[in-house]
Amino acid sequence: MPGQAQPPAKPAPARDSSLLSGLGRTLDAVAESAGNTIEWLNPLAFKYALKLDLPVEDLGDDRLLRFFEEWIGVKYRLGGDSKAGIDCSALTRRLLKDVYSLTVGRVIPDQFQAGIQVPKSDLAMGDLIFFKISNRRPGPTHVGIYLGNNRFIHASIKKGVTIENLEKPYYQAYYRSAVRLPK
């Protein structure tokens, strides 16, 4: 009715200004490091930076990201070397060739001998990491490639090509050594 007081307008919902300002600072830092443009940021880089818990800029070039996208989820097949199925040493050989232009042997013993051993505390992206999972033969029986932040890519019998955490108790128990290839 005319002349009656209207109820007060509802206040706008409160915004978490610390979250918004934090996001703004993060975007400002990204823009600053990119020369005030963010066009160079690849959506794959964000996807795998989150998966690996690494800064986007630590992922290297697009070849590594495209390799992940192409191979993650491919099933494991002993002796396999294709998208129909791949084993651990074929995966590491392919990644090293496709991403780093390095050539190594097809089997674990050859890959183990291809570089110099490095301590676990000095692991760097691209290092081969070896595990002794089976006692059926001497030496390492599984291989993956270190990606940083205790993450590595490998062909798992159960999960296929996947990224795992080296700090999981299973991998801690079977970890044996790492090799750095000459670049």
Image (tube, grey):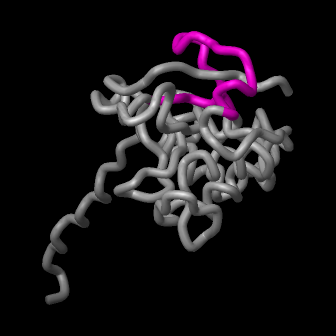
Eyeballing the image, is 26 above or below 113? below
Q: In the image as oriented, which residue stretches furthest toward the bottom?
A: 1
Indicate left or right for 87 with 169 as reference.
right
Residue 121 counted in the magenta span: yes
Q: Which residues are magenta?
A: 110-131
Q: What residue is rendered at 51% in x and 40% in y?
A: 52
Along the line of sight, the residue nearer the viewer: 138 or 49: 138
Residue 65 appears left or right of 46: right
Asked whether 20 falls inside the magenta stretch, the response is: no
**27 w.r.t. 87: above or below:** above
Q: How many marks?
A: 0
Judged from this view, the residue extending furthest toward the front is 137
Query: Percent x, y for residue 40?
Result: 80, 52
Across and down, in percent, residue 144 comes to 55, 38
Task: In the rendered view, tell whether residue 48 sits above or below residue 151.
Answer: below
Rendering quarter of residue 24: top right
Which quarter of the rendering shows the N terminus? bottom left
At a point 39% along the width and 54% down the height, the residue shown is 157
Find residue 179 and report its horizontal and vertical position in percent: 65, 22
Residue drawn at x 63%, y 13% is: 118
Report the side of 1 relative to 18 (left or right). Answer: left
Residue at 36% in and 31% down: 135
Q: Is residue 148 among what the camera can see?
A: yes
Q: Quadrant of the C terminus?
A: top right
Task: Say whether residue 29 is visible.
Answer: no
